[in-house]
Image (spheres, rainbow, N blue to C red):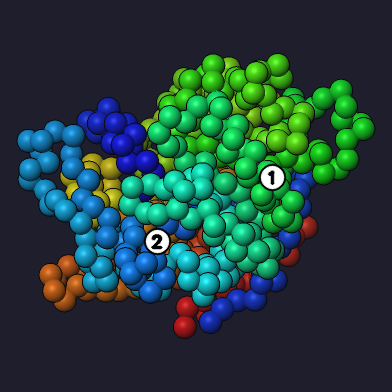
Amino acid sequence: MKNESTVEEFVAKTHHVKNQPASIAPHLLEDDDEYSVQIFYYPWYGNPEFDYGKYYHWNHRFIPHWDPNISKNYPTGFHVPPLDIGSNFYPFLGPYSSRNPAVIEQHMKWMSSAGIDVVIVSWFPPEISDEQGHPWDDLIPTLLDVAAKYRMKLSFHMEPYKNRNGESLRTDIEYIIDKYGNHSALYRMKRPKSRKTTNDEKNSRRDQYLPLLYFYDSYLVSSDEWKKLTGPSGELTVRDSKYDVLFIGLLVKSEDRHSLLAAGFDGFYTYFTAKGFSYGSTPSSWPSLSAFCRKNGLVFIPSVGPGYDDRRVRPWNAANYRDRMNGKYYADMFEMAHIAKVNIITITSFNEWHEGTQIEPAIPFTNNNTGFVYSTYDQGPEQYLHQTLDLVKKYFTPMHRIAPEKIVNIVK
């Protein structure tokens, strides 16, 4: 669930309107024209066995509508795992803990098998988390190691928090680079031509590749604060230093392209995948956004997803439900990303179960206490892993790569 307070604000404004070997994933070639398929990953789930005797996130609260007269017609309180969870789908692994080493291993196998290059991990600074979870920065070393084992890279999805500003963001970037910057699995992308400096010829090959960070809800921080970091002469600038990174901001509205460019971002992504929910999540807008980025030396990274269903945490939000259509919704978004002529796409998501965007395997399940029947995938638990690989091969695999013919026995 992405920062529910700001999502609710935006919804309020728009509401009317067993396993495959590691070698299956080809090595990510960091090159100008190389495709990259990246996926948002959430390590915020907990259960009593691994998380201090408690469930986290599976027991998600019912988020009230902003209008009390509407909210009173819907459930309140929290879900009660393991039979009752905050999702319309039920995971193949059950209400797992993100701290379970076996879960981490299985997740990385699945993502690698589906043709994923980069795992984009939701991240808060140490000792901070969203209100439904508890801090997980201590998991990052393990996630990096296991991603490397399956020949994938890892990037960071920088989540918003109270009083986030230029100074705190500089601290966050320093922390990530100092603690994780030397790990072989940290995703780096070649410095855009628009970012080349006078010292480029003297820089090593590694210096030509910068860590790429996604900044969720970037619009909550003022342009002036961002420019302190992104401007070559900004008072907190990271440019041409050991802390230099590629800043990827969130585009929601059409005009965000101009504000992100002015704020010094290196590119933008769209995250949301409910078509029509925002300008950024409307695939017909992607060719225009892609052309704008090419003209201005930015990186455009559209987000695709299999559908959207958050009615188990926002039961009043049926207007933004998007049916999976047995995979057609997902395939159509992939095709539009291809038409937009992009090299990098992001998938929302591997395991954002609350919003029903996950491609992680799900199983048929009924809560015998309440009679609630969870939604299922039409073609079996691993349908969207198979489909992801098929779509990656169809639209985002260069001819010189040799991709596997199929995923075999992902779920046994």
Task: Kindly report which numbered mark, 2 or 1, lies closer to the viewer in this rendering.
Answer: 1
- Disc 1 marks a residue whose amino acid type is Asp
Residue 82: where, in percent of width, then height? 27, 71
Q: Is residue 251 visible?
A: no
- Relative horizontal placement of residue 321, taking residue 384 as reference (left or right): left
Identify which residue is drawn at 10% across, 35% down.
Answer: 68
Identify which residue is drawn at 82% across, 25% down.
Answer: 197
Comparing 245 with 118, the one in front is 245
- Badge 1: residue crowd in 10 Å (few <14, some 14–19, many ≥20): few
- Relative horizontal placement of residue 53, taking residue 407 as reference (left or right): left
In primary-sequence order, the first of circles 2 and 1 is 2
Q: Is residue 243 visible?
A: yes
- Marks counted in the figure total 2
> Which element is circle 2 on?
loop
> Which element is circle 1 on?
helix
Q: Which residue is mark 1?
A: 178
* Figure check: 97 above or below 192: below
What is the spatial separation of the Cα atoms under label 2 and label 1, in whole angstroms? 26 Å
Q: Which residue is mark 2?
A: 45
